[in-house]
Amino acid sequence: MDTQDPQSTVIVMTELRTHFDRLRSAQLKHIPDQRERLYSLQRLREAVQHYKEEVVTAISADFGRRSRIETMAADIMVTLEEIRHAEKNLKRWMKPKSRPISLTFKPATGELRFLPLGVVGIVAPWNYPFQLAIIPLVNAIAAGNRVMIKPSEFTPRLSALLEKMLGEVFSADEVVVVQGGADVGATFTALPFDHLLFTGSTAVGRHVMAAAAPNLTPVTLELGGKSPALIAPDYPLEHAAERIATGKCFNAGQTCVAPDYVLVPRAKRDEFAKLYLAAVKKRYPTIANNPDATAVVNSRQATRLRAWLEDARQRGVVIQQYIPEGETIPEGLEIVPSTVLLDPPDDALVMQQEIFGPLLPLKSYDSHQQAIEYILQRDRPLAFYPFDKDGARLEKTLDSVIAGSVCVNDTLIQFGQHELPIGGVGPSGMGEYHGHAGFLTFSKAMPVMYQSRFSGVKLFDPPYGKLANWLVNFLTR
């Protein structure tokens, strides 16, 4: 962790605490009703539509180059759909839900009421810096909360735009954006939020959970890990290569649910590598000046990926890359070629941590069960991509592998489904959000029991006599 100036740390703590106290005070005075929440969502939707081109420009500048289509699809389109989904369903979500009462206590009645938790903290990452800040915000607003957002310091232009945009939509006692580096992040996560959502690496997630623990702050951790794709022995190899190439190349592989490695039948490994690189070439016939080809976000990440690639070379791993001939990468643009690594050992760096880039290890297997066991012996992944047309075998696979989410015969697209919650398990995270699941995450489902005027419970009041003894004997028979 960076060395911090004590005086600077005190200033950061004071400023953040001032923001937090203002939000909490406002929430204690007034809980937004359905009409107010819908109006907030409407204003947010209009702001996203108004600022979408500025979002594209800011993110591309932060990355050095980022595909406009990728930003529009993954940051703008998905976010707008989430807002519209919340607007459409909010009335139903907020309505108290009747719950049955056990026969012993009838004619009492019961229900669940959904109340906002209070002040929610959101820590957003750099890879999808707009979507991963705004979608949790949508869920939190729908649930009636006040919100503080800490965007990533690695996308400073987008972070500044977020602060500007949300400052125009919300008052300072509704939503606050705070910018800064590691010192701000550490202080932010230590605030006594009523719920804290963090999206980022597993390593940092551990620090976030530790920072939240003294306040007993509930956390939703959207982490990462090594998400496998498993190609069944008889699955059409070309189709698998096409879909995996799309998922791995999108945003230059800088996606938490990107396929991290591929399990492929041993006899088909080399053919898959050829088909995969051909699929990449078809999508990106050029790279150097291709606006569709997203760059690695910064030199720090590119240097890490190149070091992992060199580690594999030193271990004798066969490496194949797609590099267009005769191209010169513009200065200042971090491009790491799409690469396959053939059966790297498990102690290689590319097999130890989430790759978060365009490097794709291929691991050979001799039987489908062996491939399943390989996955089960490792941390539970954030995503799992089985490619299989055998229904019985697929059912067995889905009953065996526990992952944050699964997409059968494709990659990535499960992330944009409002009624399919997003969330990890174990080292890939905890908790979930998106759609109704996000509303519930940021709500307290408060059980309420309404006692009837006529109640048999008084029969159990002391002093206990023959009737009470008969009743307990009868009810426990």
Image (cartoon, rainbow, N blue to C red):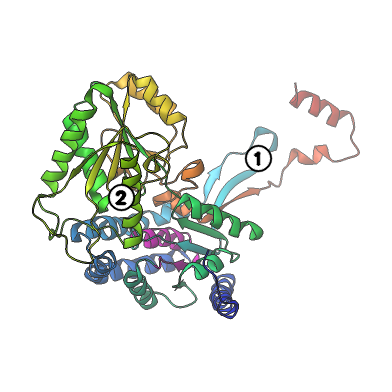
Closer to the camera in the image, 213 or 135: 213
Q: How crowded is mark 2: few (under 14 residues within 10 Å), some or many (20 or more)?
A: many
Count of numbered circles in the view:
2
With respect to residue 319, does 181 lie above or below?
Answer: below
For disc 1, the neighbor class at 10 Å (few under 14, some 14 to 19, many from 20) is some
Which of the 4 image quarters holds residue 463? Answer: top right
At x 90%, y 32%, the residue is 465
Viewer-proximal residue, 325 or 5? Answer: 325
- For residue 441, say whether it is visible: no
Magenta range: 131-153
Disc 2 residue type (three-letter):
Gly
386 to 174, vertically: above or below: above
Residue for badge 2: 357
Q: Which residue is at a point 30% across and 36% down the rendered structure image?
A: 317
The residue that mark 1 highlights is: 107
1 or 2: tag closer to the N-terminus: 1
Q: Quadrant of residue 262?
A: top left
377 sits left or right of 281 in the view = right
Q: Is residue 439 visible?
A: yes
Q: Where is residue 374 in the image (x, y as percent from the top left)?
A: 41, 28
Q: Which SS class for mark 2? A: loop
Q: Which mark, residue 286? A: none
Q: Are dots 1 and 2 in contact, CB under 8 Å?
A: no
Q: Which amino acid does label 1 sit on?
A: Pro
Locate residue 107 relative to residue 252 in the image: left or right: right
Determine the secondary structure under disc 1: loop
Horizontal side of residue 314 vs 122, given as left or right = left
